[in-house]
Structures are given as structure tokens and as C-alpha cells.
């Protein structure tokens, strides 16, 4: 792909992707077990007249769509940053264990310390943060190579999965309430959840924009980045910790939603290239769009059953992951 073709694609994506995001959000607001006519939306939002749909739209669907968008944006951003810093298109907060770290501390809070549930975003972030640091330390040997980080992450992910299962067995009488959360879902999310999650998510997304330059330089290789004055190991660690922060914010309200950080950045990368000036903003929009659309499908396409969005995304993401593995020769993976 030459420069002119890439620029043309970037313009197309810059136009089409926000439109798709708006359509997905409208779809999420209008459809579910009860459909709301489009003509009712503006009067309800402006409070012009009472409506039978007001409670459904304002109290249920609007906060759920906004939370879903932020969750998808956080996960896709974390995935994009991890894939760049590790130079591996298979890197993802769920695959390397960062999401599992946030998940286990959030689960401990919900099951063992329910009186501290208001601290859920903080505990989820701390779990993801500690896990990211642990993975980095385990991979450290006069430097932390991307391959070692991924291998350490897979091992830590397996360990955290075992610990999570152990907690479920020990506290089997309390675990029923968190099973949908373990599958990843937005059922029952409200303005309350948006209020305590949004500041973390927005802060993380803004900080991610400052990672664009170091992420682009790391793509050149460690030696080239050092020659350009970059502190490679410090930048790598900071970007990993930022990814942990974003994953923790998402996990705190949506549970263990997987594959968004894998699928979205890679699809964007295939269309517009690896330049983080474009890849990161488009991944933010694409991640939000995917989760909102998938959540609407999960709660409206299966009759009276509301499927956790994490299950639907896994159905999409797992084949995509296998597809990437089959293309490993073209992706430069060993």
C-alpha cells in the first residue's frame, strides 16, 4: 500500500467509523426487549413531554450504552498500546493476564468484602497494576523483551484463573451473583456505575494520547528508539501500566470482557497502518462501537434471554485469534 492509498483509507475510516459509532449507539438506545420509536427519543431527552418509554431510555439504556462505549474504548486502547510496545499483534489485556489481575481483586471485593464495593474501580485497577508490574519483573533479565513479557503474562494469567476458581469453590454460596460478571456483561449497569467508572476511563484515554509518540518510536526497535533519545525500558513499563489502568477501569464495571483489545486494533491496523497518531484514536472509537453493538445484539437477538456480551465477543474473538495464528508467518511471529 503506497502513501496515497493509506491516506485515502485514513480519511475514509475517519468519516465512516464515527458514523458507525453513532449508529451503534442509536441502535443500543432504541432496541432491546422493548423497542423505542426514534420519534420518541428527542422529546424524551429534552423532557418536552411525558412518555411511557422515558424510564427505559433514561434510566436503563442511555447509561448502559455510555458505559459500553467507554469499556470498549478502554479495552481497545489497552490492546493497541500493548501490541505496539510488545511488537506482537496477539497481545491483549486478557491474554497476558492484566484483565485477570483486575478481575480477581474485583471478585475478592464483591465476594469477600461486599461492604467495600464502592472501591471496585480502585481495587480492579490495583489488581491490574500489580499484575502488570509482576509480569514485567518476571520477564526482566537485563531488560524485558516483548516475548518474555507475553510468556510471563500467559503463566500469570493461568495462575490467576486457578485462584479465581478456588475463590468460587470456597465461597460457592456467594458466587452466584458474580457469575454474569465473570462472563463479562453490562446487565443492570446504571448511572451509578457510570459515575464511578467514567473518571478513570476518561483519564486513562486522555493519558493514552500522550503515549502516541513513544509508542511510535518503540515500533522502530529498541536500538533505534534509544538512539533517538528514548528511555526504552521506562517507556515500555509506563505504557504497560497505562494499559493496566485502562483494563482495570473496564473490568470494574463490565467484568472479564475479552478479545476487544485483540480484534479492534488489529482490524484498524490492517486498514490504516501502524502509525499511532491514527491507530489509537480510531481504536478508541472502534472499541466503543464494537462493545455497544455486541451488547445490543446480546440483549435483543435471543428472545427473553439476555446473553452476557463477553460470551458473544468471545464467539467473535476466538476465531479471529485463530485466524491471526494461521497468518503468523505474514505477521512476523515465530
Image (cartoon, helix red, strand yellow):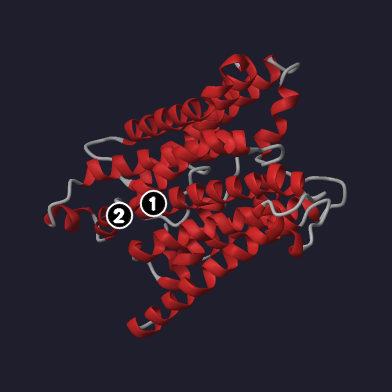
Q: Could you tell whether 234 is left or right of 281 in the image?
A: left
135 with respect to 323 (left or right): left
The residue at 53%/73% (across/down) is 16
Instruction: Find numbered disc 2 in the image and state the secondary structure of the residue it sits on.
Output: helix
Whether residues under marks 2 and 1 lie with C-beta atoms below 8 angstroms apart, the answer is yes
The answer to whether 12 appears left or right of 294 in the picture is left
- Residue appearing at x 65%, y 40% in the figure: 184
Q: Percent from the top left, x then y, of residue 88?
A: 41, 55
- Residue 26: percent from left, percent from top: 67, 61
Q: Secondary structure at mark 1?
A: helix
For the C terminus, the quadrant is: bottom left
Q: How many residues crowd mark 2 within 10 Å: few (<14), some (14–19), many (20+)?
A: many
Q: Check disc 1 and report the residue beneath it.
A: 81
Q: In the rendered image of this protein, does residue 102 appear above or below residue 290?
A: above
Looking at the rendered structure, the number of numbered marks drawn on it comes to 2
| Residue drawn at 56 percent across, 69 percent down | 19
Check disc 2 and report the residue beneath it: 215
Amino acid at each position: 500500500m503506497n502513501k496515497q492509498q493509506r491516506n485515502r483509507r485514513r480519511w475514509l475510516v475517519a468519516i465512516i467509523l464515527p458514523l458507525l459509532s453513532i449508529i451503534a449507539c442509536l441502535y443500543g438506545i432504541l432496541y432491546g426487549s422493548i423497542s423505542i420509536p426514534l420519534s420518541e427519543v428527542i422529546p424524551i431527552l429534552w423532557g418536552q413531554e411525558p412518555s411511557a418509554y422515558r424510564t427505559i431510555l433514561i434510566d436503563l439504556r442511555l447509561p448502559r450504552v455510555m458505559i459500553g462505549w467507554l469499556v470498549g474504548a478502554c479495552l481497545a486502547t489497552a490492546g493497541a498500546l500493548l501490541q505496539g510496545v510488545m511488537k506482537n499483534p496477539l497481545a491483549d489485556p486478557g491474554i497476558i493476564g492484566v484483565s485477570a489481575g483486575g478481575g480477581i481483586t474485583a471478585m475478592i471485593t464483591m465476594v469477600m468484602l461486599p461492604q467495600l464495593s464502592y472501591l471496585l474501580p480502585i481495587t480492579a485497577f490495583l489488581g491490574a497494576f500489580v499484575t502488570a508490574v509482576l509480569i514485567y519483573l518476571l520477564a526482566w533479565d537485563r531488560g524485558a523483551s516483548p516475548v518474555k513479557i507475553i510468556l510471563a503474562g500467559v503463566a500469570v494469567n493461568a495462575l490467576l484463573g486457578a485462584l479465581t476458581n478456588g475463590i468460587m469453590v470456597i465461597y460457592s454460596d456467594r458466587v452466584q451473583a458474580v457469575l454474569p460478571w465473570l462472563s463479562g456483561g453490562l446487565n443492570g449497569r446504571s448511572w451509578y456505575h457510570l459515575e464511578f467508572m467514567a473518571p478513570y476511563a476518561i483519564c486513562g484515554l486522555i493519558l493514552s494520547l500522550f503515549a502516541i509518540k513513544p509508542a511510535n518510536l518503540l515500533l522502530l526497535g529498541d536500538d533505534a528508539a534509544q538512539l533517538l533519545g528514548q528511555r526504552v525500558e521506562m517507556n515500555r513499563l509506563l505504557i504497560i501500566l497505562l494499559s493496566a489502568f485502562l483494563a482495570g477501569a473496564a473490568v470494574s464495571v463490565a467484568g472479564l470482557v475479552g478479545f476487544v483489545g485483540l480484534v479492534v486494533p488489529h482490524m484498524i491496523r490492517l486498514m490504516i497502518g501502524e502509525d499511532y497518531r491514527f491507530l489509537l484514536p480510531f481504536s478508541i472509537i472502534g472499541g466503543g462501537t464494537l462493545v455497544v453493538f455486541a451488547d445490543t445484539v446480546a440483549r435483543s437477538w435471543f428472545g427473553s434471554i439476555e446473553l452476557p456480551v463477553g460470551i458473544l465477543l468471545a464467539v467473535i474473538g476466538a476465531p479471529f485469534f485463530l485466524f491471526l495464528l494461521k497468518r503468523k508467518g505474514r505477521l512476523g511471529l515465530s
